[in-house]
Structures are given as structure tokens and as C-alpha cells.
Image (cartoon, grey):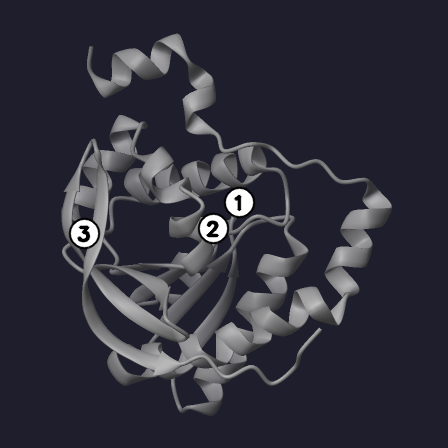
Amino acid sequence: MNRRDLLKLSPLLLLLPTLTFSEEKEHSRFIDPATVGPRLDTAYAVSKLLAKRFDKIGVVFMENSQLCAVFAGALTTGLRILGKTAWYVQGGEKLINYLEKYKPKVLYMAYFGELPDEQVQEALNGDLKQLAKYGKVFPLVFHISTVLRGYVNNALFEEEILNYLKKVKDLYAMRVIEGDVALAKATEISDLGISFGKIIDKTRLIKFQEG
């Protein structure tokens, strides 16, 4: 039985365990410095790595996710301070309109687990499908949590996404390795998953604010 047949038998394989939060708890998690602070620290490190190699970067964040939007805003600002051209790009139905307006050369895909996993997965899959339909192949950099929480590999169950990502020669992910944030390049992609095994560069993750 191949991976796609198994998926048909068990759709839950697409999803990590779902966490549910009340509206009040979600709001408190958003404004809590212990939640926002680490995102700002990470954005600072990521901006330094991206600025060394890329310009004209579209920082795409998950539609309706407050923390993704905070991170994307911080990353965009960091890149601009470092002299790079960068745009704050909301995912969702207007994604392609933004890409046609700004004409970025690289996309940073910032999707992570503030919301239930199935919502994050749906948003990432939807935006990657839009890119596949749009037809332009962008160098892609996936955010740490987008890879770590399994969203990227889960997206490969969608054949059109798998085929699109196979066309992307410059496919990267941010990883955290022993206190460093590292830019890693994909070394293998198949319907079994993506291996981000080649470390291109890294920088120390500096914690400016503890909880």
C-alpha cells in the first residue's frame, strides 16, 4: 500500500494532534510577552540569515493568524533595516494579487501553530496550491515551525503541491540547532517527504526578552 492509498483510509494522518483554545485564551496567548517575545527574537535571527543571500523577499503569513502576522511584520522590518526590499504579504485569496503587485523574487512562508493544526495545514496547502496554479516558481524558505510541526511534509499528500515543489530548485527551511538558527537547503524531495539536510549558514539565537 502506497502513501496516498494509506491517506485515503485515514485522513487523520494529515494532521497533528489538534489543540483547541477558548477565544479568551487565544487572545491572552497573543498578547503575552512570553508568547510574542520568542517570535521577535527568531525574526531578528532569520532576518540576518536571509539578508546575506536574498533580496526582494515576500514574507507570506497565514491569513487570520495573529502570531504569524506579528512574526511576519517583525521579519519584514528587520530585512528593511538591513537594507533589503521586503514586503508583508497576507496569504489567502489575495495572495496572487499581492505577488503580482510587488513582484518578489523569494518567498518566506511563515505558518505555525497558534491556531488548530488542521487550520494551519489547510491555509498552507491552499496557498501552495495557489502558487502551483499561478505557475511561477519562486525560491521558497519555510519557517521553523512550518517544517518542525509537519505541515510541509503533510502538504506533499496533495499531488499538485508535490509536483510544484519538485520544480523549486532553491527550497530552504529555517531550523534551530543547538541554540542557533540555521538556513538549510533541501537535499531530497519525494512523496515520502523533504529532507532539509544541507546547512548553508547559521547565526546565534539571541534572547532579548524572557517571559
The residue lying at 51 percent from left, 50 percent from top is: 91
* 92 to 27, vertically: above or below: above
Give the side of residue 71 with respect to residue 126, left or right. Answer: right
**Mark 3: few/some/many CA within 10 Å (<14, 14-19, 20+):** some
Q: How far apart in space, not on screen, are marks 2 and 1 (Cα)?
A: 6 Å
Q: How far apart in space, not on screen, are marks 2 and 3 (Cα)?
A: 19 Å
Q: Secondary structure at mark 3?
A: loop
Marker disc for residue 206:
none
Q: Residue at label 1?
A: 92
Residue 51 in view = yes
**Residue type, mark 2 in image:** Leu
Q: Residue at label 3?
A: 168
* 23 to 138, vertically: above or below: above
Q: Are the residues flagged by discs 2 and 1 in contact, CB closer than 8 Å?
A: yes
**Residue 115 rendering spot, x and y as whole percentages:** 64, 43
**Residue 102 rendering spot, x and y as whole percentages:** 41, 67
Q: Secondary structure at mark 1?
A: loop
Looking at this view, is 136 or 115 the one in front? 115
Residue 2 placement: quadrant: top left
**Residue 28 rendering spot, x and y as whole percentages:** 81, 57
Looking at this view, is 34 or 159 the one in front? 34
The residue lying at 41 percent from left, 13 percent from top is: 10
**Residue type, mark 1 in image:** Gly
Q: Quadrant of the C terminus?
A: bottom right
Residue 210 placement: quadrant: bottom right
Q: Are the residues flagged by discs 3 and 1 in contact, CB closer than 8 Å?
A: no
Q: Residue at label 2?
A: 95
